[in-house]
Each structure stands twice: as C-alpha cells, then as structure tokens.
Amino acid sequence: MKRTKRALLAVTLGTALVFSSTTAIATPAQTSKGNSNQTQNQATIPYYVDESKLSFNALAGIETNRYWGVHKGAGYRIEVPENWNGELVLYAHGYRGTGLELTVSNPSLRQHLLQKGYAWAASSYSTNAYDVAQGVKDTHALGTLFNGIVQKPSKTYITGHSMGGHVTAVMAEQYRNAYDGALPMCGVTGDTALFDYFTDYNLVAQTLAGIEKDEQLFPANDEYVEEVVPIISKELGINTTLTEEGEILKAVTMNLSGGERPLYDFAFESYKNFLFGQLTIDPTFLVAAGNVIDTTDSVYQFDQDMNSLSPEEQALNDAVLRVSADPQSKQQGLTGIPKVKGTHTIPMVSIHNIGDLFVPFHMQQVHAQRANENGNADLLVTRVSRSVEHCGFTQNEEQEAFNDLVKWVEEGLKPEGDDILNPEAVADPLFGTQFTRGYRKYDPLWNATTQ
C-alpha cells in the first residue's frame, strides 16, 4: 500500500546495563515457565501483523515518501527521500521472541540514510522465533517489492543488528548478485556457535558447582532457573565474591567469548547472571529438525597457556556433559538457522562490541576465520567498539562504518579494520580504540579522555 508524504504528515529493552535501548534481543531465552509455541511447527503458528501499527511519520525537516503494508505475510515499511540518490538500504531486525505479533523496526541509521539520500526498507518477517532463513527470504522479497513500488535501485546495501546481522551475512552469501555491500552489526555471524556458547557456560557452571556429569541438566526445564541456578550461584559466589570455582567460570567464559581483552571484568559482572537464563528448553529453537547445539568440540581453558590443557583443565573438560547436534538439524534445508560460511562476494564491514557477552565478540572471530579459510579475507573488514552493551554502538560508530562501506563499494577504497584474530592485539589494553567514537563511563579510558 502506497502512502505519500502528504497523507502521512498530519528496542526494546530499556534498562539494561547490558543491552542497547535501540535493538531487539538477539536470541531466545526459553528457560522459565512456559513457551506455548515450543512444540509447534513454524508453519502452523498463527502469526499476524497489526496493520494499524505499520504507519510512521516523517522525521522533522526531511521530506519523504513513505509506504507500508503486508507482503507475503510480513509487514513492511519503505521510506524514500525526495532527494533520493537511487540507492536502497535493506534493514534486518533482531530477535523478537516467540510471540504471535510481527512488528517492523526502523533502522537506527534512518536519519543518516535519509540525509545522505538513501531509501530504506524493513520487513517484520513472516515468522518470529530464531528463524533466520525466513528473515532472509522476507527481506529479499521486500527488495523485489521495492522495485515494483518505487523502481529498481542502482545499488542495494544490506544491514541488520544481532539476529539481523545473521540475516545480513546469509543474504550476502545466498543472493550473490543482488547486493552491493553488507554491514552486519553485533551479528550472530557464528550462527549456532552462539547456542553452543550459552550451553557451555551453563554446563561448565554446573560442573564447577559440583553437579556430576550424569546429573547435569540439558536442555533446561522449568525448574532450572528457580531451583538449580541458585545452588550454582551460591557455590560459585556469583552474587557475592567469586569463589575459586567462580573465578574458573569467569576465565573459561573469557576464552569462549573471544579471549583476553579490555573491559572483560566489567562485562562478566554485567552478564554473569543473565547467561544462566540462556540455557534453552527447546534446542530446536522452533526452526530446526532436531537439536542444533554441539559442544563436543568445546575446549574449556582457564590458565595462561592457550596451546595445551593442564591436568586441572583436562579434569574439567572430562567432567562436563557434552551435547551432540542431531544430524538432521545440520542438513541443508532442514533448519531455519543457516550457517554463515564466509563465502560472500561483496564488500562487507562487520562491527561488534568487545564486551558484549550476549552475542559475544567471538561470533565475529568465527566469521573472520571462516572467511580466511575460504580465501575470502579481502572482502571482510572487522571493527570493534569498546562497549559492553549488546548492539550498544554510538550513532557515529554506525555511521562511520556505513560511510566507509559505501566508499569501498563505490570507489574501491577498502577501509581499515581491527586485527581480531591476533590474540596479542586483542589483549592490548588499547584494543578497540581505533573505531570507538566516545568512550563509555565504565571504560578506564573515559577518565583519561575527560580530565
């Protein structure tokens, strides 16, 4: 449905030290009581779009044509500035939970895009849950719809936050000739490795709390958070002073989430309780044929030697329950959580926060390693910001990344990035300063730059 500017004139988590106030949660937290949809197939869930919520107003001082409606079961919004430069940015939103209502988010870059002359379009997707495959299809379909409603753009960029970063990376690989540049932000670009990480954290914690392997709980049940987690917390000193075992959990988590790096102490304090809520009760996440989690190759290290396991580390590794993914969940076409292979053929700039322990910095490292293995490193630039919030970028950080991506696409000038696969570089106390635009108050460098 078209809406002209004249007709139109007349996320998500607010608190949170650990979450951005502008971006939806990335992944399912299904550990406490109740998920009425968990046994249903996505195709049978009665999702709906409240069309009365699709309309949106122009920004002050920016004349635009705006369009909204429902396409193939997904709500959408499109905005085209009067000074349109002929180019389009498709935005993919983050995880929306497992509720029935489908909603659309305006991109955080909206004002910047419009001021630069770009049109943008965003889809609700036609499903919720962690259905990346459907997000890919619906966002791509919206680009095709844009061609009919407006006209075919001269260039199309794709971007998204969190789960939307996963969508962005997969779109770049699956539709190689459709897009010109990609900007995944705080993306789950390690795909199911994120769910492995959540599981690792909880099973290691259970082990360190003295729970024997044959009694360790996976998946979670309704009693896990209310009855088991308090026992773990007491044994590890989670809410007081960390015990020796609690310090081991902290060290293991550091290595699982990206290695030694600045702000980690503050990040662990911010997320240590939250991560207990991420042991899923449904390892299919509603979209796979079976369990997608695989911790059989996880290595739990907590001393300074990253090249081998000490006897104490080996004992811990032997004591932790291992989880194997169901073979059918890994077969192509049988899961809504497609793998990010690092095989994109367009310029891609990926940005992440080094202290994010919800979708940890390690996701970006996994993606970079896969791109390297595929001889594709020249098409991926990675940058980090010194923040612990999930998707907690400043506007300047996002805008700079987008502008540099455009310059790369249009002028062939590859931008600089951070050396995220070099442990020595990552461990440097100044790591992340190159692309941080405004230090946060919890960063030691904030005091140094404000005095």
Image (cartoon, rainbow, N blue to C red):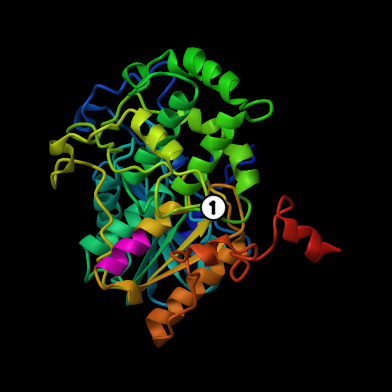
- Residue that sits furthest to the right in the current view: 451
Q: Position of residue 197 (x, y in %)?
A: 40, 40
Mark 1: which amino acid?
Answer: Asn
Query: Which residue occupies the foreground of this view, 97 or 418?
Result: 418
Element type at marker 1? loop
Instruction: Name which residue lies at 26% across and 66% down.
Output: 373
Q: Is residue 381 left or right of residue 284?
A: right
Query: Which residue occupies the foreground of this view, 393 or 363?
Result: 363
Tell me the quadrant of the picture where the C terminus can be found.
Answer: bottom right
Q: Position of residue 170 (x, y in %)?
A: 28, 57
Write down the quadrant of residue 31 in the picture: top left
Instruction: Name which residue lies at 58% across and 46% down.
Output: 20
Q: Is residue 416 left or right of residue 48?
A: right
Query: Which residue occupies the foreground of this view, 158 or 247?
Result: 247
Inspect this view and state whether residue 63 appears: no
Verify whether residue 24 appears in magenta. no
Instruction: Name which residue lies at 46% across and 66% down.
Output: 422
Q: Is residue 331 left or right of residue 87?
A: left
Q: Position of residue 312 (x, y in %)?
A: 45, 36
Pointer 1 residue? 57
Q: Can you say whether 444 is above or below 202 in the image?
A: below
| Region of the chain picked out in magenta, as a range | 367-373
